[in-house]
Image (spheres, rainbow, N blue to C red):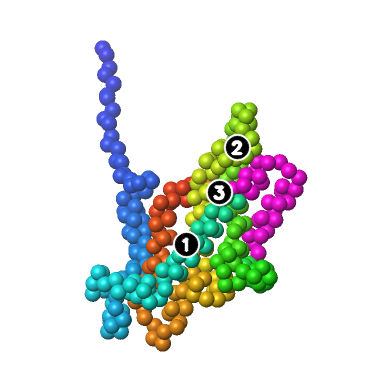
């Protein structure tokens, strides 16, 4: 007589649905809602600036708390900027200053960073320590000595005088050096075995691998020089050498009554090139930030 073993009845397993990253749906929705709210709060000031650039002075006085302009096709404020306020000249000056500083910082900091990371020489650690120390010095501590040097060189009221202190910044050298340390030594040795000179190794092997760092330095340098206000305000003595921030400040202070529409249109004019540059280089910028560990 055989004994039949009862077959166990399978029990139902309750699976709790999870959202992205293993979080519960309710928690994920709460996170998304919080992120949307924070994003809207951060974008609100920019929206006010953009909307205000299309408003007339009458709209500001009749409805100071209003957000939207009567018409987004009203470009009168931008026309006033470039026909009466001289923003064409200021835009060109800012483009020259920013372009020169971006090129010099990328080129010179790449060479310095490569040397500090891959070229053995006596005192290399001391030089790198000096670069890090220079990053910690407050700018106000060197402002007066820089101005004395510019005066002695006869560069006051010139674009060269504005550019001179920004030709190579310590933070750019630091970023390049940190990224250059990740370049494999074996790759450099292989290039030398193939007959490449030191300059050839740098130009053909190292520099192409520094793409994310180059993008990071280019964006940082451009932002710094494009938005810089204090130094150009001191060095520039005439409208021929004003940059955009200085020109906008002088234009808003010269009038007896502040024209808010023109002022906000000038802010939008300054903001647009920065956004365009970031959109083109954001992928390399994020890679560079991740590689160098900057926050």
Residue furthest out toward the left:
70
User: Disc 2 on helix, strand or loop?
Assistant: helix
- Answer left or right for 168 relative to 247: right
Q: Is residue 35 above or below residue 17?
A: below
| N-term mark: 2 or 3 | 2
**Distance of mark 2 from mark 3, alpha carbons?**
25 Å
Image quadrant in which you'd find residue 202: top right
SS majority, magenta: helix
Q: Which residue reaches farthest top?
A: 1
Of badges 2 and 3, the one in the foreground is: 2
Q: CA distance from mark 3 to mark 1?
A: 28 Å
| Frontmost residue, 201 versus 92 | 92
The residue at 45%/83% (across/down) is: 254
Residue 292 - label: 3
120 in the magenta segment: yes
User: Which residue lies at the image location 52% right of the left edge and 49% below the top edge?
Assistant: 214
Name the residue carrying label 1: 95
The image position of residue 83, as x and y in percent, is 36, 74
Please, is residue 118 above or below residue 1 in the view? below
263, above or below 178, in the image: below
Q: Is residue 278 visible?
A: yes
Q: SS for tag 1?
A: helix
Residue for point 55% across, 49% down: 292
Does residue 45 appear in the picture of this structure?
Answer: no
Residue 274 position, x and y percent, is 43, 60
* Residue nearer the viewer, 191 or 86: 86
Residue 281 left/right relative to 139: left
- Of the numbered discs 3 and 1, the one sitting upstream in the chain is 1
Secondary element type, mark 3: helix
The residue pinned by badge 2 equals 200
- Calculate the distance from the C-alpha at mark 1 to the C-alpha at mark 2: 31 Å
Q: Which residues are magenta?
A: 110-137
């Amino acid at each position: 007589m055989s004994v039949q073993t009862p077959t166990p009845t399978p029990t139902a397993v309750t699976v709790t649905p999870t959202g992205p990253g293993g979080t519960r749906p309710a928690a994920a929705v709460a996170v998304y809602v919080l992120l949307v709210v924070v994003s809207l709060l951060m974008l609100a000031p920019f929206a006010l600036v953009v909307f205000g650039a299309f408003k007339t002075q009458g709209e500001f006085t009749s409805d100071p708390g209003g957000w939207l302009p009567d018409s987004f096709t009203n470009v009168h404020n931008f026309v006033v900027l470039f026909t009466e306020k001289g923003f064409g000249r200021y835009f060109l000056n800012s483009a020259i200053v920013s372009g020169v500083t971006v090129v010099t910082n990328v080129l010179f900091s790449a060479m310095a960073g490569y040397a500090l990371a891959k070229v053995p020489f006596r005192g290399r650690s001391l030089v790198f320590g000096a670069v890090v120390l220079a990053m910690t010095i407050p700018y106000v501590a060197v402002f007066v000595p820089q101005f004395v040097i510019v005066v002695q060189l006869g560069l006051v009221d010139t674009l060269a005088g504005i550019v001179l202190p920004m030709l190579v910044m310590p933070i750019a050298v630091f970023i390049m050096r940190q990224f250059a340390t990740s370049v494999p030594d074996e790759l450099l040795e292989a290039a030398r075995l193939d007959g490449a000179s030191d300059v050839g190794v740098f130009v053909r092997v190292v520099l192409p691998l520094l793409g994310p760092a180059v993008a990071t330095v280019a964006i940082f340098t451009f932002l710094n020089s494009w938005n810089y206000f204090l130094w150009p305000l001191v060095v520039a003595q005439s409208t021929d050498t004003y940059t955009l921030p200085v020109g906008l400040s002088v234009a808003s202070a010269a009038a007896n009554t502040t024209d808010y529409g023109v002022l906000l249109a000038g802010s939008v004019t300054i903001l647009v090139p920065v956004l365009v540059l970031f959109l083109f280089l954001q992928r390399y910028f994020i890679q560079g930030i991740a590689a160098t560990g900057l926050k």
